[in-house]
């Protein structure tokens, strides 16, 4: 019932306590960039059964608050970045912790911080919104739950959304690589500084780019990018476990392992990702987008079977 009340807050715009904002400063990245989320949604939408597709289209046609933002994202693919489009609206700040789960690990025996991960996290958010989608009779609540599920399934497959690295310089964790500055190629061959989390959000520099003020890429750029993600990552991989479409903790654990073994590998502040690192990371990023799409479709097909 706690999350149902939050859903009503989302519709009404009445401010809740912002105590969780200490974990979510404005500079912190929230998830795959708009392109990554759109790629997940593109893959999923093509795999929905007729009933699930019709139900999704029906709910996404509903204008929920903020109406101007939901009006711009009534199709399934654009609805995937709606949860990030709320960034300028401070009344929704208390939902920022729901985009991730900070599972900590230490690399130098620094004790793990207490109270991490937070009880309000992406696994809990997916469980709560799934319950609303399956059981609520409130169409507005269901419409919001669907938008959040589309987005959060993408987020939970981004490895750095499920881990925080602890060391003596970051005893409370590095917020999924947000506090790890790295050097990547910029314009005119010059290096620019970004953070590790943002590098992964952009698909290791390979996903379609987001415009100024987080403007999503054109829809026309998404199908070819999604096709790249699916190539070599078939939906019949038994490790996907598509017959178990609500196992959100397992998805988070996969991302946690990939964060430790791939995303953080050799990446300390000031590092420049090597060619080998970028090649391996891009393969992982594409696979996680593909798996997110397959699993999102399996989830919605299970909610609304033919």
Image (cartoon, grey):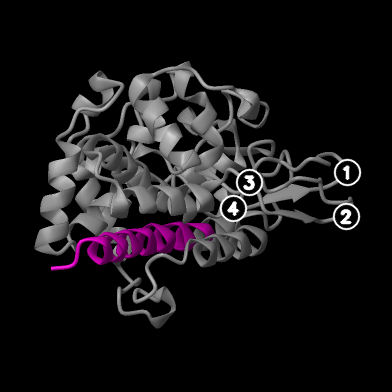
Residue on which disc 3 sits: 119
Q: Earlier in the sequence, mark 4 or mark 3?
A: 3
Mark 3 vs mark 1, foreground winner is: 3
Disc marking residue 108: 2
Mark 2 against mark 3, which lies toward the viewer? 3
Q: CA distance from mark 1 to mark 4?
A: 20 Å
| Above/below status of 163 relative to 175 | below
Q: Earlier in the sequence, mark 3 or mark 1?
A: 3
**Is 160 situated left or right of 150 in this image?**
right
Q: Nearer the viewer, mark 2 or mark 4?
A: 4
Q: Which mark is residue 219?
A: none
Tell me the element at label 3: loop
Classify 194 as above or below 233: above
Q: Nearer the viewer, residue 215 or 301?
A: 301
Q: Mark 1 near mark 2, Cβ–Cβ under 8 Å?
A: yes
> Along the horizontal axis of the image, is 133 left or right of 269?
left
Please give the residue where the numbered disc 4 appears in the rendered image: 162
| Front tag of 1 and 4 | 4
- Mark 3, other Cα within 10 Å: few <14 / some 14–19 / many ≥20: few
Q: Residue 217 is drawn in which quadrant?
A: top left
Q: Which residues are magenta?
A: 281-306
Q: Position of residue 275 (x, y in %)?
A: 56, 56
- Which of marks 4 and 2 precedes in the sequence? 2
Q: Nearer the viewer, residue 180 or 266?
A: 180
Q: Which residue is mark 1?
A: 168
Tell me the CA gap for discs 2 and 4.
20 Å
Residue 285 seen anywhere in this rendered image of the structure: yes
User: Taking 281 as reference, is 23 above or below it?
Assistant: above
Q: Position of residue 252 (x, y in %)?
A: 54, 60
Residue drawn at the location 56% of the way across and 37% of the way down: 97
């Amino acid at each position: 019932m706690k999350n149902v009340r939050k859903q009503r807050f989302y519709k009404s715009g009445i401010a809740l306590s912002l105590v969780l904002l200490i974990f979510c400063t404005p500079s912190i990245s929230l998830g795959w960039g708009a392109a990554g989320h759109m790629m997940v949604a593109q893959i999923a939408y093509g795999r929905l059964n007729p009933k699930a597709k019709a139900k999704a289209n029906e709910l996404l046609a509903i204008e929920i608050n903020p109406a101007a933002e939901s009006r711009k994202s009534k199709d399934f693919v654009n609805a995937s970045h709606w949860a990030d489009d709320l960034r300028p609206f401070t009344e929704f700040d208390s939902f920022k912790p729901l985009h991730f789960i900070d599972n900590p690990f230490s690399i130098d025996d620094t004790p793990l911080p207490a109270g991490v991960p937070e009880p309000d996290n992406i696994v809990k958010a997916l469980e709560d919104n799934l319950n609303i989608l399956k059981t609520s009779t409130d169409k507005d609540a269901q419409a919001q739950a669907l938008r959040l599920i589309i987005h959060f399934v993408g987020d939970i497959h981004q490895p750095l959304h499920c881990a925080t690295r602890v060391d003596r310089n970051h005893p409370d964790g590095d917020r999924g690589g947000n506090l790890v500055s790295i050097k990547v190629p910029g314009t005119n061959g010059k290096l620019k500084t970004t953070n590790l989390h943002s590098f992964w959000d952009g698909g290791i520099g390979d996903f379609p780019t987001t415009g100024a003020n987080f403007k999503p890429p054109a829809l026309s750029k998404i199908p070819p990018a999604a096709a790249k993600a699916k190539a070599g990552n078939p939906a019949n991989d038994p490790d996907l476990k598509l017959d178990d479409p609500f196992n959100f903790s397992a998805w988070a654990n996969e991302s946690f392992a990939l964060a430790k073994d791939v995303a953080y590998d050799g990446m300390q502040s000031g590092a420049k990702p090597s060619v080998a690192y970028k090649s391996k990371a891009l393969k992982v990023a594409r696979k996680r987008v593909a798996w997110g799409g397959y699993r999102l479709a399996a989830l919605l097909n299970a909610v609304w079977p033919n």
